[in-house]
Image: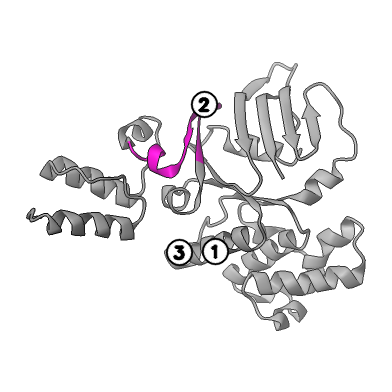
Amino acid sequence: MDIKLQDVEYRYASGTPFERVAIQDINIDIPSGTFLAIIGHTGSGKSTVLQHLNALLQPTKGQVHIGDRSVTAGKKEKNLKPIRRKVGIVFQFPEHQLFEETVEKDICYGPMNFGISEEEAKERARQGIIQVGLPEEVLEKSPFDLSGGQMRRVAIAGVLAMKPDVIVLDEPTAGLDPRGRKEIMDMFASLHKEQNLSTILVTHSMEDAALYADEIVILHKGNVSQKGVPREIFKNPEELITLGLDVPDVVRFQHKFEETTGIKLSRTCISIDELVQELAQVKDRGIRL
């Protein structure tokens, strides 16, 4: 399902003395099947953009096209449930939203709220728990008896049980250690391919944006500052630093290496494997490192 933000502006407390422009002139195309990362400094407008993707917020100017639906500024939209069923959002610390007696009931809550039968919802819960890498016996447990990482997976299974065409991830690895972060991101990458999803990742992690996304959009002070494929985005790390952003460790190492040695690698590396390959080629040319 395609999503397009066209000249979108959003003002909080519009028409009051507390009015504040959060985002403006936002133009982003997200073709079906894209893995898009949205990055930006705190206050850049990431969360505001995120909430437009399934009409939790409606623009004060411009249009948001979500599949065959359009949400237009100044026009009151009715029956937004179909949009929210197709665009699932995994909010930051989703495990804090668990509330039912059992894992199965928690996962079933969303589908049943949208009119799915209990029998079908239970089957979706079973499928969802397998998709997130947990054993089926977890379904009968209380979510509050699980570890933090397991609780997060249960919350994600609840979103997957809605059978969305688009999944939006709001800092999905927040608070996780490096191993847990990689496991969660690898899981989303697999789901993206296996389920043919459109995936939108809102993150502070430059590593995750570089490794998993097809395209990156950088927001700065409520505007789109840059957009492109990861290799192009990280080609000029100085530009990102001026925006208050970090760069992946691999990119930082390559930049320092090229500055120190005067040796220019043939491409911007976005993974350790690529960097190792490039350095091996330098060594094969007889250049001492």
Q: Which residue is mark 1?
A: 184
Could you tell me which residue is drawn at 68 percent across and 74 percent down?
Answer: 130
Q: Earlier in the sequence, mark 3 or mark 1?
A: 3
At label 2, which amino acid type do we have? Lys
Could you tell me which residue is drawn at 31 percent across and 47 percent down?
Answer: 251
Could you tell me which residue is drawn at 76 percent across and 40 percent down?
Answer: 67
Boundaries of the magenta span:
216-235
The secondary element bearing badge 1 is classed as: helix
Could you tell me which residue is drawn at 75 percent across and 77 percent down?
Answer: 139
Quarter of the figure that contains the N terminus: top right
> In the visual, does 117 lie left or right of 56?
right
Closer mark to the observer between disc 2 and disc 1: 1
Quarter of the figure that contains the C terminus: bottom left
Q: Position of residue 34 (x, y in %)?
A: 59, 47
CA separation in Å, label 2 and label 1:
29 Å
Q: Earlier in the sequence, mark 2 or mark 1?
A: 1
Q: Which residue is mark 3?
A: 177
Which quadrant of the view contains residue 127?
bottom right
CA separation in Å, label 2 and label 3:
29 Å
At label 1, which amino acid type do we have? Ile
Q: Which residue is mark 2?
A: 221
CA separation in Å, label 3 and label 1:
11 Å
> In the visual, does 1 lie left or right of 188?
right
